[in-house]
Image (cartoon, rainbow, N blue to C red):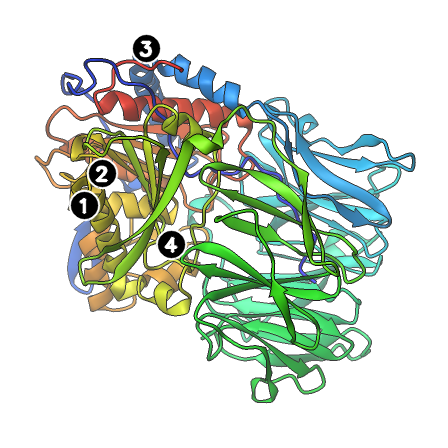
Amino acid sequence: MKLKTFLPTSVLLLAACGGETTSNDNEMVNQEPLVYPVTRMGNDSSVYFGTTVKDPYRWLEDDRSEETEEWVKTQNEFTFGYITDIEFRDKIKERLSELWDYEKLSAPFEEGGVTYYFKNDGLQNQYVMYRKNEAGEEEVFLDPNTFAEDGTISLGATSFSKDGSIFAYAISEGGSDWRKIIIMDAKSGEILEDTLKDVKFSGMSWRGNEGFYYSSYDKPEGSELSAKTDQHKLYFHKLGTPQDSDQLIYGGTEAEKRRYVGGEVTEDDRYLIISGSVSTSGNEMSIVDLQDPSGKIVPIVEGFDSDSYVIENEESKLYIVTNLDAPNKRIVTVDAANPTTENWVDFIPETENVLSPSTGGGYFFTSYMKDAVSQVLQYDYEGNMLGEVDLPGVGTASGFGGKKEDEILYYSFSNYHTPGSIYTFDPKARQSAQYWKPGIDFDQSAYESKQVFYESKDGTKVPMIITYKKGVELDGTNPTILYGYGGFNISLTPRFSVTNVVWMEQGGVYAVANLRGGGEYGKEWHDAGTQMKKQNVYDDFIAAGEYLIKEGYTSSDKLAIKGGSNGGLLVGAVMTQRPDLMKVALPAVGVLDMLRYHTFTAGAGWAYDYGTADDSKEMFEYLLGYSPVHNVKEGTEYPATFVTTGDHDDRVVPAHSFKFISELQAKQAGSNPVLIRIETDGGHGAGTPVSKILDAYADEMSFTLYNMGIIDYKVK
């Protein structure tokens, strides 16, 4: 019963790209120390438990000031001037564009007897939504490329009414998390009413054809950076009525004060499931019987110590996915009339691997992560295991979701050297068939992935998948990207990307470490990388780099570390703790000021993972000990650093990156360049136009290779 939602964005690929070395590839580029633009230092400071912490670049937090705008312009001019001087940058852009230019397709889905799917012909900025008409012919249903000439308005969540006659879709402008919702007649394409505005962190869940539930905050006044997002509210929008008359369902009182609230209607239109949380981990859950005129909200799970959601129901029988008393998750059943936890009965018990289930065609599909790769089992509604789904290989399989009456389901499969393909699955015959294969000019048989388990500082075994072209010599000279995340229960599973291809086809190595703080081994693995244990994540990443060097994959002069968002924090922390370990650091849209992150937009919701400087003296000192902005030391030679962010990022606000690069430029010793690239009209990554993605990666990759001493790039 999960929302039929597809986010047709150009996925933020987790890789970098490289080139062929010349005979001089082992000679480091001789660069003179750069003279950076001067950033004004202010006198701001804060006092935490009697300790004064200076904050000289706090003025950059004002995202609307003319001074900040001029600073952004100056920094970009300086950075692009540097990049322009790298002669092979355009060759990288050309090769990226060449490989990116292949048709991409989503799995089809049916609404109201009509088949829909998303497709990109290759280099379109945004995916186009298609449907098959009554004659079975393909026609454009919705083209987000028409929203804005430069592709900076993107499509977000989509949702059809129960009979498929009405379509609601969200749009994002300039990468912002704030959305507008547009409602249209699915048959004619006619816009039915005024646009809903100021919607954030929300899907749309329909109650019949009457209307839908959505969530948002009160729109802040003034700077987005200082906006508090601690009162999320669930509304019901009835079609044909103005937004200001929408019914407030949950979140309007102090007792219902939650940072995140969501509502979802079961497939049979019987129940509304309400979820509320105060952080990114742990939620309460309640149920409303939509046939009950009183609209009474009945608790299912109280408190925020576990994560739970309703995945399915058969009349009053609820199927709940939970990690309550099951760190790797299980599925339980309970009657909706008395749904509290003491009445739960195991349906599919917890196993040693992390569970991620779906339903479709009248069956349950339990996808397990086994050392970060997929294993899928099929169950009937009685809890009988029917067998394992035979997947195309070792990698990541996702999908198997659909309506109960669907006779054919779909899933996708990929890994680091296998382009994503779509497969059909007949749940009764239990057979797969290839539905679509991308036409990319890439010989996947020439590459291989190897999973290793290395030892972290405290002896913990950490998995890492290393991918490269067959025949690569482990002589310590290979340009290598080490990618990580390590937070928020998010798992890094094998995925294909064009940027990986361009990197590896020239002999580059791409390594992904599955650090603590992620979800690869369930709640315990996640918790082992949170708050006062956050240093475990950085130790795991450092140990991964040391392993790659020790085993001869690369050397410190040919190693780059990369991560985005929480992964940007990872890179910032590791490069300030071990600047000798790598040659290049690539922190993207990073959380870099750990003393003030919770004062910006949605930042306070991340406290489960980080803690805050206001919690206690001990927590403040711990955060201060690794906060990248506060640990840049005068006179230290840091690796060549390419910070990237978007000026419209209202999730991890750009002030983090602005302050970090200001510290680096003021204190850097030696000749390694420390630069920032600020995407104008850019957000946190989702919905970024393909044209901007290609430019951004070409800039980042050329910077990386050039600072590894590679002075040419030749496409084979």
Q: Residue at x 83, y 37 (%)?
A: 132
- Tell me the element at label 4: helix
Task: Give the mark, 3 or 4, whose residue is nearer the N terminus.
Answer: 3
Spatial CA distance of label 1 from label 3 is 32 Å
Q: Residue at x 47, y 24 (%)?
A: 694
Q: Amino acid at mark 1?
A: Glu
Q: Nearer the viewer, mark 4 or mark 1?
A: 1
Spatial CA distance of label 3 from label 4 is 42 Å
Answer whether labels 2 and 3 touch (C-beta < 8 Å). Answer: no
Q: Nearer the viewer, residue 38 or 266?
A: 266
The residue where tag 4 is placed is 599
Task: Give the mark, 1 or 2, whose residue is nearer the N terminus.
Answer: 2
Q: Nearer the viewer, mark 4 or mark 2?
A: 4
Q: Quadrant of residue 34?
A: top left
Circle 1 crowding by C-alpha within 10 Å: few under 14, some 14–19, many from 20: some
Answer whether labels 4 and 2 touch (C-beta < 8 Å). Answer: no
The residue where tag 3 is placed is 87
Task: Give the mark, 2 or 3, whose residue is nearer the N terminus.
Answer: 2
Q: Quadrant of residue 527?
A: bottom left
Q: From the viewer's perspective, is residue 337 above or below residue 688? A: below
The residue where tag 2 is placed is 42
Q: From the viewer's perspective, is residue 548 above or below residue 4? A: above
Circle 2 crowding by C-alpha within 10 Å: few under 14, some 14–19, many from 20: few
Q: Position of residue 204 (x, y in %)?
A: 69, 54
Task: Give the mark, 1 or 3, whose residue is nearer the N terminus.
Answer: 3
Residue 45 seen by the camera: no
- Tell me the element at label 2: loop
Q: Position of residue 447 (x, y in %)?
A: 41, 34
Task: Give the mark, 4 or 2, whose residue is nearer the N terminus.
Answer: 2
The residue where tag 1 is placed is 546
